[in-house]
Image: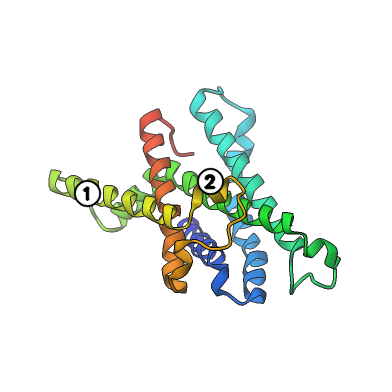
Amino acid sequence: MRYGLDILMLLLLVAEMAFFYLPPLLHEAVGVTFLLPIAGHLTLNRRYVSSLSRGQWRRPRVLRLLLNLLLAAACLVTVISGCLISSELFADIVPFSLRSNPSLYSLHSTAARYFLVLAGLHLGLHLKAWWQKWLHAAGITARPLPARVLLLGFGMLLGAAGIYAAHQDRLTEHLLGAHIFMTPALSYNGTGYALTQAGIFLLFAEIGWLLSIGKGVRSK
């Protein structure tokens, strides 16, 4: 259930990031619905929260907590700003002067990109546990050298694709809060743009995994 829930959240996140190609009502409805699997994820990982008052606070643990707090903040800002600029679900509740505030649109767009990046890093820190689960499910107990070389090549290819996707969507400028109305990625169709967002997510998941094995950050 845990891994299925994570996959569901990834699919919903990528779908939400492709909001240019979704009807506003569907985008807002999926955004609100997204809170349910997030709540489920937090419930399944409640032991992590309860463990924060115990044990030693070495650098890897502090970095994990900081990442989780930033991810939670990005999620909350994205959801709250999204509700404030709602043109469908909350249009009768939020005043028009607030809904039409361009600063809120910019905040929502920037926070959503941080949410995507931080979610990728978060998954990357726990990617080893995911990988072991997949290998176990496939009945693979050994990893011969050819398989490792193939995996390394795939990782490099995935990283290159993610960097290209980030460039196409002008990710750095989005994260800096720049007002961007058009990117090369928007010339794609809906599927292409969704794949761009998935590529960005997987790039930062790979970065998180590299940090975890390089700094000894272990899965919770």
Say what secondary structure mark 1 lies in.
helix
Viewer-closest of 179 and 141: 179
Q: Quadrant of residue 50?
A: top right
Q: Position of residue 79 (x, y in %)?
A: 69, 57
Say which residue label 2 marks. 118
Q: Position of residue 6 (x, y in %)?
A: 49, 57
With respect to residue 148, does 11 lie above or below? below
Q: Position of residue 56 (x, y in %)?
A: 55, 22
Q: Which labelled disc corresponds to residue 6?
A: none
Residue type indicated by callout 2: Leu
Q: Position of residue 179 (x, y in %)?
A: 62, 55
Residue type indicated by callout 1: Gly
Say what secondary structure mark 2 lies in.
helix
Say which residue label 1 marks. 153
Q: Is residue 143 visible?
A: no
The residue that appears at 40% across and 56% down in the rendered structure is 165
